[in-house]
Amino acid sequence: MSDVKLIGVIGAGQMGRGIAQVAAMSGFEVVLFDVNKDGLDFGFNFIQKQLDKGVSKDKWEQTFVDATMSSISTSTSMDALKECDLVVEAATENKKIKFEIFKQLDNIVKEGAILASNTSSISITEIAEVTNRPEAVVGMHFMNPVPVMKLVETITGLETSTATIERTEAVAEKMGKTVVRADDVPGFAVNRILVPMINEAFYALYEGVSDARGIDNAMKLGCNQPMGPLELADFIGLDTCLAIMNVLYEGLGDTKYRPCPLLKKYVAAGRYGVKVKKGVYEY
Ligand code: CAA
């Protein structure tokens, strides 16, 4: 049973709006925060559209959509998060930005609340250290697309308390997710394995093993992956993939994690993937 009722979500981008949608659909009250008003409105309208699609596919009733949407409020002021029982940060994957957000959250959000990060690779122990409540800081890593993917990876920082991790996992389960608990090591469980595979696909492309379609088809049809690794890289964001490889390379100090020069070149050229309509493929 979860004692958490009000959830704050930081960031109305791809991950944040998905987390807000699933939380609201699971009966939580949600405050969706973003500093960018246009991004916030886009995120809120995106959730509405996703839920409307469900009505046209007979997945749920209009009354459910109306109740879900009315449980989501939006704000461009972080003060709106002060009464939250749990805040999930899903801002840009950048240490400086995350540290600044957690410092502010620590001052704003009520005592006893959990501060979670959806980071895909930044150390929870380091994020916790910038707050005065490291025992209440935890990793809550959702997968993209959040409404579809069944996993939530929870990550315990060095100081994360048992109560914090257990309350967080109860929330994830109430959202209908299956939890895998991971230690606070670079890449945690999913990205420690997934992103080096994607990086290897870039090396295969770089070395001319096959072309992009060939590499993706090999893994789709030969290994039953829903998307080929290069298509998946475009979907995750090539900049995010590179950031994760850098965390693995620096954090584990092993040359087997060095980012592929071709991945670096795509990112340098601004080919970040689906979000800019141009990555390995064009959209
Ligand atoms: N948001 C919400 N729902 C979505 C969606 C989105 N962005 N994209 C697809 N869906 C839903 C569709 O509505 C559809 O639902 P119904 O069956 O109930 O109608 C269902 O997903 C299937 O969609 P489609 O038929 O359009 O497409 P598909 O069968 O090709 O599946 C996919 C699309 C689910 C994205 C599939 O290709 C897939 O599973 N890809 C792999 C995704 C993956 O590996 N994600 C993890 C990335 S790693 C990560 O997130 C962690 C990190 O830190 C980097």
Image (cartoon, rainbow, N blue to C red):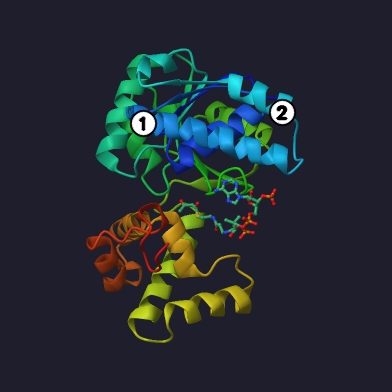
Q: In which quarter of the image is residue 104?
A: top left
Residue 217 placement, left or right of 90: right
Q: Does the residue labelled 2 lie within 8 Å of ligand 1?
A: no
**What residue type is disc 2 on?**
Gln
In front here: 145 or 242?
Answer: 145
Q: What is the CA distance from the residue labelled 2 to the residue labelled 1?
A: 26 Å
Residue shown at 30%/25% (left/top)?
103
Viewport quadrant of the C terminus = bottom left
Query: Are dots 2 and 1 in contact, CB under 8 Å?
Result: no
x, y (%) of residue 159? 42, 33
What residue occupies the far bottom of the structure in this picture? Answer: 209
Is residue 237 visible in the rendered image? The answer is yes
Residue shown at 61%/49% (left/top)?
149
| Numbered marks: total | 2
Q: Name the residue under label 2.
A: 62
Residue shown at 23%/63% (left/top)?
269
What residue occupies the far front of the structure in this picture? Answer: 56
Is 18 located above or below residue 246 in the figure?
above
**What residue type is disc 1 on?**
Asp
What residue occupies the far left of the structure in this picture? Answer: 268
x, y (%) of residue 69? 60, 24
In front here: 91 or 212?
Answer: 212
Q: In which quarter of the image is residue 282?
A: bottom left
Is residue 166 visible in the rendered image? The answer is no
Residue 214 placement, left or right of 37: right
Is 25 located above or below residue 178 in the figure?
above
In front here: 227 or 107?
Answer: 227
Q: Mark 1 points at which residue?
A: 38
x, y (%) of residue 85? 52, 19
Q: Which of marks 2 and 1 is nearer the N terminus?
A: 1
Q: Is mark 2 on a helix, strand or loop?
A: helix
